[in-house]
Image: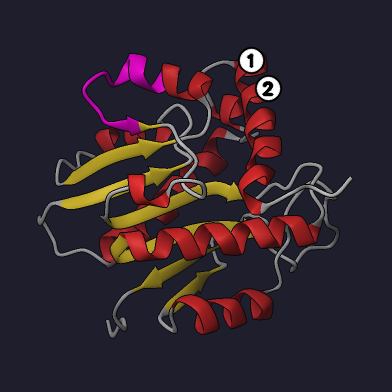
C-alpha cells in the first residue's frame, strides 16, 4: 500500500523505536543500538563534528533531533562540556517521558517538524543520530524521500552545521530493514539542495558513515 506523504513515513520508525524501549528499557538497546561500545563511538563521532564547527568555549545551541531518552546528553555531561546548550526533540512521547524524568530542567520538544517547521527555533548545530540508519518496512524510495524532506527542512534551522549517519553500501551484504545509501547519491543531493561544504566519516569501524554539513568551508 502506498503511503501518503513524507510527513507520515516516520510513524513506522517511531513505532519501532518505542518497541525497543518497551523491550529493553532505558539503555542502548532501548533506543535500537545492539552494542553499548558502538553507541558510544557514534556519540563521539557526532561530538567531534560539533566541536570542529564551534569556537572553543563559546556557547553552542545544540538540537539533538530524534533524541530518544537523551543518551547523548548523558554522554556530554560525562565529558564535562557545559558550553553546549542542549535541546532534544523526538516524536515519541514514551521516549521523551524517560528523558524528562532524568533531565527535568532540559528543554524537549515533541512535534512533527515536517508538518510544523515554523515551530522549531534556530540552533547553531543539529545532530541526527540514528534517524536514517533503519528504514524498517519502508522501501528505499520511501526512506530516501523522507531523508531528503527532513534534511531540507532542518538545514535552514542551523547557523553552523549538521551531522547525520546512514548505513554504508561498502559492506559484504545488506540488511533489508536498514538504510544503505550510496555515497555518490547522497553527495549529489547535498551539493544540489543543501551545501557543497560537507565531509563523510567512514573511518570509525561500523557499517555506516556520518556526514558533516557546514555553512562555511573547513580549511583546518
Quadrant housing the N terminus = top right
Q: Decide if residue 37 is in sight here.
A: yes
Which residue sits at x=51%, y=33%?
Answer: 91
Assign a secondary structure to mark 2: helix
Dot 2 and dot 1 residues touching (CB under 8 Å): yes
Quadrant housing the C terminus = bottom left
Q: Can you give x and y, in whole percent of width and height, for residue 151 in the image?
A: 50, 62
Q: Is residue 150 magenta?
A: no
Give the numbered dot on residue 22: 1
Image quadrant assignment for residue 189: bottom right
Q: Is residue 101 magenta?
A: yes
Q: Which residue is mark 2?
A: 19
Which residue sits at x=27%, y=55%?
Answer: 122
Which residue sits at x=33%, y=31%?
Answer: 108
Query: Seen in the image, is 191 located left or right of residue 89?
Result: right
Which of these two is toward me, 158 or 34?
158
Query: As displayed, is residue 134 above or below residue 124?
Result: above
Query: As displayed, is residue 212 above or below residue 39?
Result: below
Region of the chain picked out in magenta, as a range: 98-108
Label 1 packing within 10 angstroms: few (<14), some (14-19), many (20+): few
Q: Can you give x and y, in whole percent of width and height, for residue 137 in the image?
A: 81, 42
Query: Seen in the image, is 139 located left or right of residue 196?
Result: right
Query: Seen in the image, is 218 located left or right of residue 128?
Result: left
Residue furthest right in the image: 1
Residue at mark 2 to residue at mark 1: CA–CA distance:
5 Å
Which of these two is toward me, 70 or 94?
94
Q: Can you give x and y, in whole percent of width and height, for residue 136 in the image?
A: 76, 42
Q: Decide if residue 208 is in sight here.
A: no
Amino acid at each position: 500500500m502506498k503511503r501518503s506523504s513524507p510527513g507520515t513515513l516516520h510513524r513506522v520508525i517511531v513505532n519501532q523505536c518505542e518497541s525497543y524501549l518497551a523491550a529493553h528499557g532505558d539503555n542502548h538497546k532501548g533506543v535500537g543500538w545492539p552494542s553499548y561500545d558502538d553507541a558510544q563511538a557514534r556519540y563521539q563521532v557526532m561530538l567531534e563534528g560539533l566541536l570542529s564547527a564551534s569556537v572553543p568555549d563559546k556557547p553552542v545551541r545544540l538540537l539533538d533531533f530524534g533524541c530518544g531518552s537523551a543518551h547523548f546528553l548523558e554522554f556530554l555531561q560525562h565529558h564535562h562540556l557545559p558550553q553546549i546548550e542542549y535541546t532534544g526533540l523526538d516524536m515519541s512521547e514514551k521516549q521523551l517521558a524517560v528523558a524528562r524524568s532524568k533531565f527535568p530542567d532540559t528543554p524537549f520538544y515533541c512535534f512533527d517538524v515536517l508538518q510544523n517547521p515554523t515551530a522549531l527555533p534556530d540552533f547553531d548545530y543539529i545532530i541526527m543520530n540514528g534517524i536514517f540508519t533503519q528504514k524498517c518496512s519502508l522501501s528505499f524510495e520511501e526512506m530516501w524521500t523522507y531523508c531528503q524532506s527532513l534534511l531540507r527542512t532542518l538545514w535552514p534551522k542551523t547557523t553552523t552545521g549538521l551531522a547525520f549517519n546512514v548505513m554504508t553500501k561498502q559492506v559484504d551484504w545488506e540488511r533489508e530493514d536498514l538504510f544503505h545509501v550510496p555515497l555518490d547519491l547522497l553527495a549529489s543531493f547535498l551539493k544540489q539542495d543543501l551545501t557543497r561544504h560537507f565531509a563523510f566519516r567512514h573511518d570509525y569501524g561500523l557499517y555506516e558513515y556520518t556526514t558533516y554539513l557546514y555553512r562555511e568551508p573547513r580549511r583546518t
